Image (cartoon, grey):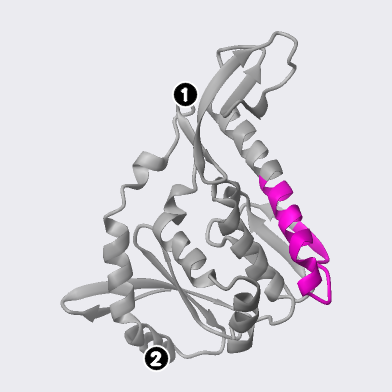
Amino acid sequence: MKLEITHENRKIEFNIIRSNRKTMEIRITPPSTIIVRAPRNITEKAIIQSVEEKKQWILNKLDELKDIDYSKYKKSFVEGEKFLYLGDEYTLQFVVDPSEKKIRVTFENNKLYIISSSNNLIKEKIKLAIEKWYREETLKQILNIVEAHQLSFNSRPRSIRVKEQKKRWGSCNSKKDLMFNWRLGMAPVHIIEYVVVHEMCHMVHLNHSKDFWNLVEKINPDYKERKMWFKKNGHKLTI
């Protein structure tokens, strides 16, 4: 369902997605898609009221996003192109090795190498190979960070996975399954750490209450600065 309100002569159109959730969430997907996730039993009037209360924040966010040129962060997967890894940019280089049976990605000497038996590669295959590499590297970083902070928690994650998450950097369910966006491997390590700590704290508080944020701050005293990093740079973590 799509609804709209008007503020300062500007239309705010938003989609409503209902599910078995307890709270309402307003999320903006760049550059301008507004989605309201709401409980099944909440009225349309209450949803509109909630959007009304957030209307200035929504317009400010839309204005912020419209100035970003997202196209310049999309990759063409050609030699010499720059790719982010742990916060720094590295050059993509192709290596032909007739003995290779499939495309392999390695990071050596501050370069990202695509090794294959042919120099005539399909763009989609290169993209899939690089994504697979990011998934593996991101998981390694996350596992190390989890172990480094495990002493701060009385329980361990039941599982830790890296997956496709277009709208979240991480999540934690009531069973303590931690899931992370594979694109995190492009961010600096201290930023990855914030996301991991954030989700580990959800093993204790499955909400965003004051107690939750107090626990996050106890482990990462500068969490607000790390959180702000995503608002300024999150759109760069893409291929």
Which quadrant of the view contains residue 208?
A: bottom right
Expressed as whole percent of the image width and height from the top left, the position of residue 103 reads: 67, 23
Q: Which residue is mark 1?
A: 78
Which one is in front, 161 or 151? Answer: 151
> Which numbered circle lies on residue 45?
2
The residue drawn where x is 66% and y is 37% is 133
Q: Which residues are magenta?
A: 138-160
**In the depicted structure, whether residue 125 falls above or below residue 51:** above
The residue drawn where x is 28% and y is 72% is 59
The residue drawn where x is 63% and y is 70% is 198
Which one is in front, 16 or 165? Answer: 165
Q: Answer few, some or many: residues within 10 Å of disc 1's Cα (few below 14, many 20 plus, some between 14 and 19).
A: few
Q: Answer few, some or many: residues within 10 Å of disc 2's Cα (few below 14, many 20 plus, some between 14 and 19).
A: few
Expressed as whole percent of the image width and height from the top left, the position of residue 209 reads: 59, 86
Expressed as whole percent of the image width and height from the top left, the position of residue 162 reads: 69, 52
Could you tell which of marks 1 and 2 lies nearer the N-terminus?
2
On the picture, is 103 further left or further right than 168? right
The residue drawn where x is 83% and y is 66% is 158
Which one is in front, 55 or 146? Answer: 146
On the picture, is 117 further left or further right than 184? right
Q: Main secondary structure of the magenta part?
A: helix
> Which numbered circle lies on residue 63?
none
Which one is in front, 47 or 229? Answer: 229
